[in-house]
Image: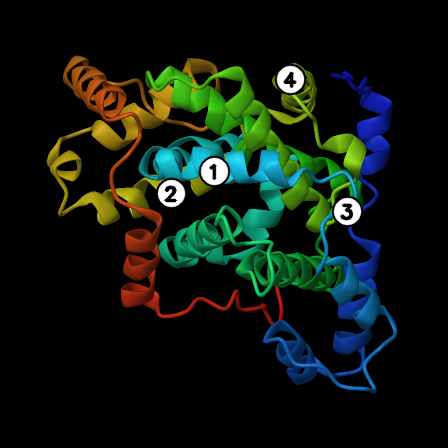
Amino acid sequence: MHKPTYTNEQLAQLRQIADPLADQIVAHFFSQGRAPEFAQLMAGAHQADWPAEVPAFLAQTAQLPPWADPELMARGCRFFEQRTQAIMSLLGFLSLPYCYAAADGAQVLYRSGRIVADTQRRLAETAQFVLEVTDPLAFGPGGEGFVAVRKVRLMHAAVRYHIGQSGRWDAGLGQPINQEDMAGTNLAFSFIVIRGLRKVGIAVDHQDALAYLHLWKVVGWLMGVQTDLLPDDERAAATLDQLIASRHFRKSAVGTELTAALIQAINETFRDLPQGRLPGFVPAYFRFLLGDRVADLLGIAPATWFAGKLVQTFNLVQSVQGGSGISRTEMIENIKRQYGKINFNVPEKI
């Protein structure tokens, strides 16, 4: 497959670009004091006097890109279905903290407040989004995937608007939730997950990897990420990942605090599970998956000998099970029991 070439200069320019269409919609509603109507749009309503950008946005987020391959997408969904428990675990233990290591992008997560103040609900929102867009029916007639993408994309635009209005954003960081940061997040949810599965001993063949990357390429496109920032294969994904990491991975107070909040939230979630009663397991598993260099950037302490052995045992069980376990349906029901239907609430200010 074609291997895109990325440069520092290109990515620096892309930090100044976010999501113009969604940003215009949000600016229209909030600058005119029409926040309640924006909430109606998020809920799926429509009115004739809304700005012209709204129909264009709804149309764009209701169809697949012309290059989308339904067979590859279906295979990507099957890949997820067969490894649901392992992938969802990796999202919390690997993908999210991996994003926190990108110091500039982590500033947005920190300033939005909720990832620290309400970490568990934020994790549930992320889990619900992933479960919705990886459903085999997600992007078919009446599928929840289009709706989920639309809500999250508008929520990101609202966060950008409020941060811009706050007067406390450093323009040198680029636009909040910009193209480069969105591309990095897409990699964390796709390529980094594939790498994590292999690290815990779960085999991923080349064709399954291509299919899963393609599924997330479609999701990324629907989220407003430029196509050339959405790699087709693992080699191109690794190239982009390495460049973004070299540009942004560094120790920061924000990254450390976000990681500490995440570890605490996962400890609380696991407290009634066997691994939750194993001292030191959660931070040790973070370190194992992230590697020492990234773990050090995030302030995760080195694992004790005992915690290291716990990680080895857990990985052995994961490998034997092949990533199977609790199903998608069970996970969705668990989220609903605890939080009800999550609607991706938009902040009124930041």
Rendered view: 99 above or below 224? above
Going from the N terminus, do you reach mark 1 or mark 4 first?
1
| N-term-proximal mark, 2 vs 1 | 1
Q: Residue at x 17, y 21 (%)?
A: 310
Foreground label between 3 and 4: 4
Residue designated by label 3: 175
Which callout, 3 or 4, points at the residue further toward the start of the chain?
3
Assign a secondary structure to mark 4: helix
Residue picked out by circle 4:
242
Q: Residue furthest front?
A: 71
CB contact under 8 Å: marks 2 and 1: yes
- In-image side of 314 versus 232 (left or right): left
Tell me where residue 201 appears, x and y as whole percent.
Answer: 33, 16
Residue type indicated by callout 3? Gln
Q: Nearer the viewer, mark 2 or mark 1?
A: 1
Q: Position of residue 71 (x, y in %)?
A: 60, 36
Q: Earlier in the sequence, mark 2 or mark 4?
A: 4
Mark 1, secondary structure of its residue: helix
Q: Closer to the camera: disc 1 or disc 3?
A: 1
Can you say whether 224 is above or below 260 in the image? below
Work out whether mark 2 precedes mark 3 in sequence or the reverse, and give the earlier one.
3
